[in-house]
Image: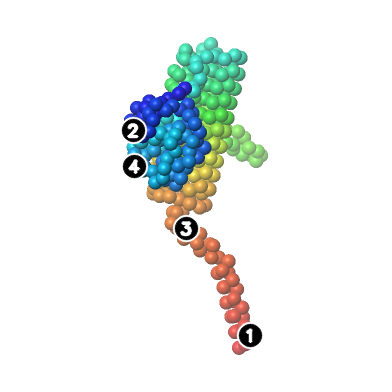
Amino acid sequence: MEFSAAQIADLLNGEVVGDSSVTVNTLAKIEEGHVNALSFLANPKYEEHIYKTNSSICIVNASFEPSQQLPATLTLIKVEDAYACFAKLLEIYNNLSKKAPVIEQPSFIDASAKIDSDLYLGAFAYIGKNAEIGKNVAIYPNSYIGENVIIGDNTTIHPGVKIYQDCKVGANCIIHAGVVIGSDGFGFAPNEKGEFQKVPQIGNVVIEDSVEIGANTTIDRATMGSTFIRKGVKIDNLCQIAHNVEVGKNSAMAAQVGIAGSAKIGERVMIGGQAGISGHLYIVDDTKIVAQSGIPSSVKKAETLMGSPGIPLEDFKKSYFGFRKLPFLLNKVAELEAQIKELTQNK
C-alpha cells in the first residue's frame, strides 16, 4: 500500500517540509534508503546519512535543523518524537500485513474447543480439547495448543510454538517461533537408592496481557500453582524461565537469561543478556542487572548490579580496576620479595 507524506503527517500529527504529495510503500533504514521508502532520524550520530539518503520521506524531530543541503528528492515530516512516531508506523505496517482469517488444511481443532470466526490457523496446527481462542488471534503453522489452553484477543502465535495443557495467554501478546510454554519444571528428588525420581509438575503458566516472548524461549509450568509472566513483560530469544517463577509487570530481559525455580522478579526490572538468577530469591522493583552477571541472593535495594556475584556497578568498576592492575602488583611483590631475600642474605 502507498501512503503520501500528507497522510503520514496526519497520522502522526506532524508537519510536512517539502512535497506533501510524495508517496512511499516501504520502510528502510536511513543509510539504506531508496525511492519510495520511508526512514527516520532520531539519533544525532546518524545525521550524516540524511544528507545523502535516497529515501523519499524521513521522519525527524521537530527540533531538527539541517546543517547541510538536503537531497532535493527528500521530504521531511517533523514530529515531537521521531523514534516513537516511527515505532507507531511500524505497528500500523505490521497490522496491515496480518494474516486474514482462514483455517488452513491440514489442521486439527477439537470439537470442544471454542474459537472465534476471525481466527487464522496455519496448516499443521493443533488445537486441543476445551481450548478457548479469543478474537482476532493468529496461530501460525505447526503450532500446538493443548487441552484447556486459553488465548486472549489479538494475540499472535508464530510458527512452531508449543503451549501445553492448562496454560493461559493474555490479550495482545506476541509469541515468536519455537517458544515452549508449560513444559515440565526441573523437579527431581533422589530416592533411597540415590536415583532421581521425577516430581510431577501439575501447575501451569499464566501469561498476562501485552507480553512478548522471543524465539526459542522456554517457560516451565509450576510444580503446583502457576508460573507468572505479568502484564507488559518483554522476553528476548533463548531465555529459560523455570517453574514457579514470577516476572513482575513491565520487566524485560535480553537473550539467554536464565531464571531458576521460584525466583520472584519485581516490576520494571531490566536484565542483560546471559545473566543468571538463582532460585528462591526476590529481586526488588526497578533493579538493573548488567549482561553476564550472576545473582545468587535476594536484591533488596534497587540499583545497577554487575559481576558474579552481582555487586553495585560502581563497586564493580573499582574492583575491576584493581584486578587489571594485578599483574603489575604481582611483579612488584616479586621484586620486593627478592629485595627482602637479598637483604636477609647480606646480614
Q: CA distance from mark 2 to mark 3?
A: 46 Å
Q: Is residue 316 above or below residue 283?
A: below
Q: Residue at x 60, y 88 (%)?
A: 347
Q: Which residue is mark 4?
A: 63
Q: CA distance from mark 4 to mark 1?
A: 76 Å
Q: Amino acid at mark 4?
A: Ser
Q: CA distance from mark 2 to mark 1?
A: 86 Å
Where in the figure is residue 70, as x and y percent of width and height? 42, 40
Q: Residue at x 51, y 63 (%)?
A: 322
Q: Residues within 10 Å of mark 3 (few under 14, many from 20)?
A: some
Closer to the chain start, of discs 2 and 3, is: 2
Is 16 in front, or is 144?
A: 16
Q: Amino acid at mark 3?
A: Lys
Q: Is residue 329 above or below residue 214?
A: below
Point out which mark residue 15 bears.
Answer: 2
Q: CA distance from mark 3 to mark 4?
A: 37 Å
Q: Nearer the viewer, mark 2 or mark 1?
A: 2
